Image (cartoon, helix red, strand yellow):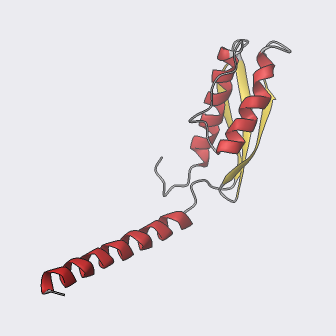
């Protein structure tokens, strides 16, 4: 092999090792701090309050603590949204429940507010 090819391979190897090392370090950093966090959102019937539980850097539980949403209509959005947030570990791709859009948005806002409090200081999210 000529000298240029050897140098190119060496530079690529060093770059690859640096990339892998940085990725492993970032993977070890926690995004969330364990605990239970409260968030609020403005629903159709008024304030909606949730508690979001974080354990081992994962969303493990979300409970609607209080709300004034219409029984059987607005509150029908709670379970599917909570299940999706826990499954997806975030609210980014969560859609509003048809017929309960304002309640859905309030629930997502409340969860986001709680998660913002749980963000690890090193993440700066």
Q: Which of the 4 quarters of the picture holds residue 80?
A: top right
Q: Nearer the viewer, residue 49 or 9?
A: 9
Spot the residue most to the front: 1
Q: Which of the 4 quarters of the picture holds residue 114?
A: top right
Residue 117, compared with residue 24, is above or below; it is above
Residue at 51% across / 55% down in the picture?
121
Residue at 57% across / 42% down in the picture?
116
Which image quadrant: the N terminus?
bottom left
Residue 31, compared with residue 97, is above or below; it is below
Q: Which of the 4 quarters of the picture holds residue 95?
A: top right
Residue 46: % across, % down: 71, 15
Residue at 64% across / 29% down in the picture?
108
Residue at 64% across / 45% down in the picture?
89
Query: Taking 116 as reference, is 37 left or right?
Result: right
Residue 22: % across, % down: 42, 69
Residue 37 seen anywhere in this rendered image of the structure: no
Residue 52: % across, % down: 72, 42
């Amino acid at each position: 092999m000529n000298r240029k090819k050897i140098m190119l391979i060496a530079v690529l190897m060093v770059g690859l090792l640096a990339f892998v090392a940085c990725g492993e370090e970032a993977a070890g950093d926690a995004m969330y701090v364990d605990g239970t966090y409260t968030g609020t959102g403005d629903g159709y019937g008024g304030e909606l309050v949730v508690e979001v539980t974080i354990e081992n850097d994962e969303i493990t539980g979300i409970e609607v603590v209080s709300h004034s949403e219409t029984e059987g209509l607005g509150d029908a959005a709670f379970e599917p949204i909570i299940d999706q947030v826990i499954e997806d570990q975030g609210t980014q791709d969560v859609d509003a429940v048809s017929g309960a859009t304002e309640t859905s948005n309030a629930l997502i806002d409340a969860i986001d507010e709680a998660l913002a409090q749980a963000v690890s200081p090193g993440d700066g999210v």
